Every structure is written in structure tokens, then in C-alpha cells.
Image: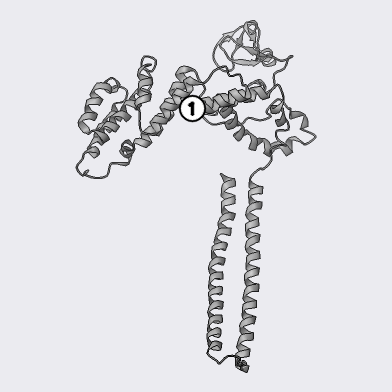
Amino acid sequence: MDSCLGVEQDLDKATSKFTALNEHTNKILEEVINQVEELRKEISQQPPNTPLSQSQTKVVNDLASSVKQSVFQLSTDHRELHATVSRVGKSIDRHFIADYAAVAPKAESFCSDTNRPIMEQAIAQHLYRQDLEDVGDSLVGEARVGVSERGSTFAQLQRCAAALALADPAPALAWAAARAHDLAHSPLLFTLHRMQMMKLAREEGISAAIAYARAHLAPHVARHERALRACMGVLVWCTRAAPPAPPPPDYAHLLDLRALGAEAGEQFLREACSLLRLAPHSPLAGAVLAGARVLPALHDIRAKMSHPHVLAAWADDELPLEVELGEEGGGYHSVFACPILRQQASDHNPPMRLLCGHVISRDALNKLAAGLKLKCPYCPMEQSPSEARQIYFS
């Protein structure tokens, strides 16, 4: 964002200067044209082949000199404007990184005979997850990609979310109703029924909305009483007669079906993916989101990491720093790093799983072990060091 603001400032300067120069140029040209027209009319009033008088000659020479000076000044202003526009390009180069090849020197490895089929499979799965089954089928057929799953389950979820964005909760309600038992403790059913209730209120009237609420929202009163009261109160603004006053800000969003649909769509995908044990993003989309956050940080430290004193800390198969990927970014580790000693695991220092499920390195296990008992550094559970088991990452 800071980079965008920096470029925006230079762009605003260039735009302001262009606008001012455009107005100034139009004014100068208009004055020159008027002077030339007046002189032409004055000369045209004389008989043909009449030589110019001394005063007229002076006027013509002065006008020619004035036009020449104006053209020179406009040319100078144009060169200054060109320099200002060039600074915008330099500002973009300064604030944004055009080439990440230095950060990812092994990017060409994606094109190898071994990795190319994996990349093609990830692209095909992403297309299926985006409900682009025709495009995915064409890619699979022409590139002969072996896709283990066609992604129809996630494609169905995408269609439900797309319908919610268009203020149509019916597909999502049908999907959720078929899994009502699994969603008993989830707020998703209430969110979808609330949206359907407000849709009926806008399209069929308050009576239809109240009847729907009595039939479907009664089981949710205990958990969502306050939200349900807001829905019932906002029905006043769904009458055909003129409403008494604009709705309060806290209730106004309930009258916007598109806003309710966008909110319900995000919640639907989150809850559905959690229920079906699916990642909310395709592997390709997840890699892109994580990479977009990681690359700028890597670029900033690349120069420092290339210093001879710290060169050994930069390895091709690990990330030498922690990067926050956001709430939906997930966690990615190219290798296991011990959370206690902050050291990379190796064959001589493998990761060890404690009975409580926490994982630390063998060196940390040996240092934490005091006699016959070991207390987990993350929970109160005590155990024997011999009960820890080595784990393997495939």
C-alpha cells in the first residue's frame, strides 16, 4: 500500500501539470489564432497586390516573433512535462519490483520433465475448483494431464457461493439442509435462512417473511435471538407504504440482499470446506497467495543475506524468516524448524512427536529432559523422554 501511495503522489503531480499545461496551451493558441485572424482581415481589406505599409510590416514581424516565442515556450513546457511523466515510470520502478529472478533463482525448475506434469495438474485442479469444467477438460485432454479428482464437489460449492452473490440462497440452503445434522452447531443455517427471509420480505411481503421465520428460524432463537430481533424489526422498512424514517446503520445492511449474499457466501465456503475437510483455496491459488506475501520480504533481505558473514544462513530449500500470511493464508514450511531452538531439522536432529501431540527437535528434547520426566513446553502434560516418537515428512 505504501508503494501504491508513493506512485500515486508522483502520478497526481504529473496529472496536475498536464492539466495546467493543457489549459495554458489552449489559451496561448487561441490568442495566436485571434491575432493572425485580425491581421488577415486587415490585410484583406486592401486592394490586391498592394504592398504592406511600414506599420503593417512591423505588425507582421512582431506577430511572427510572438508566434515563434510562443512555440518555443510551449516546446519547453512540453519537455518539462515529459520529464515529469518519466519520473512516474522511475517511481514505479523504485516502489515496485519488476524481476524476482534473484529471489527465486530456481523458477525454471517448474519446466522440468518431472515438475511440469505436477504444475499442469495443479492448474487443472484450479480450473475445476473455479467451476471452469469445460476449460479444465480441454486442458486435461490436450495436455494429457492426469487429474486424480475432477473437483466436482468444490465446483458445487462455488456454484452455491455464486448464487449467494446474486442474492439467491436457494442452492446453498438445499446443500446445507441435506447436512443439517453436521451443521447443528454452525451459524450457517441461520445466516442462509435469514437471507431467504429478507428476500421474501422484499419480493412477497412481510406476511411471507414472518411465515418463513416461524417455520425455519424458530430452532435458532436461543443462539441468535438478538440477530433475529433485528431481522423482525427491519421488516418495518419492507412495507409497500413509505417507511417512517431511514433504517438505523446497524440494520441497513439487512435490506441489501447483495451485501447479505456476499457475507453468506464467504461463510458458506468457510463452513462447507471445514465440514468436507477441503482447503478453501486450490493448491495453485494457495501457492500464489502465499508467494505474493513472501516474495517482497525475501527481496528486502536478499542483499543482507548475500553478505559473506551470513551467506551460510541462506539455503535453497528453506525460508530464512517467518512471514505472516494472514488469517486465511495458512502455514507453509519447506522444512521443519524446531519451535524451541529455532533450528532446522536434519537427519541428525529429526523432529520428535510428544505424547501430547506437540513436535520439537531431538536436541530440544534432550535439553528439556530432566531425569525420567519431561514437561512439554507448550502444555502441562508430563511424560517420559523415551515416549517421544520420531516423525517423517513425505
Residue that label 1 marks:
131
Q: Nearer the viewer, residue 23 or 6?
A: 23
* Residue in the image at 61% along x and 25% along y: 142
Q: Quadrant of the N terminus?
A: top right
Whether residue 180 sits left or right of residue 210 in the image: it is right
Whether residue 193 sits left or right of residue 322 in the image: it is left
Q: Nearer the viewer, residue 42 or 392?
A: 42
Rendered view: 153 above or below 324: above
Quadrant of residue 209 in the image? top left
Q: Quadrant of the C terminus?
A: top right
> Can see residue 172?
yes
Rendered view: 187 above or below 69: above
Q: Nearer the viewer, residue 74 or 133?
A: 133
Label 1: few (<14), some or many (≥20) within 10 Å? some
Q: Position of residue 52 (x, y in %)?
A: 61, 92
Q: Position of residue 180 (x, y in %)?
A: 36, 16
Quadrant of residue 81 in the image? bottom right
Q: Position of residue 6 (x, y in %)?
A: 59, 50
Secondary element under disc 1, as helix, strand or loop, is: loop
* Residue in the image at 59% along x and 7% along y: 383
Which three-letter amino acid code belongs to the residue tagged 1?
Asp
Quadrant of residue 362 in the image? top right
Q: Nearer the viewer, residue 295 or 142?
A: 142
Q: Position of residue 273 (x, y in %)?
A: 47, 21
* Residue in the image at 25% along x and 25% along y: 212
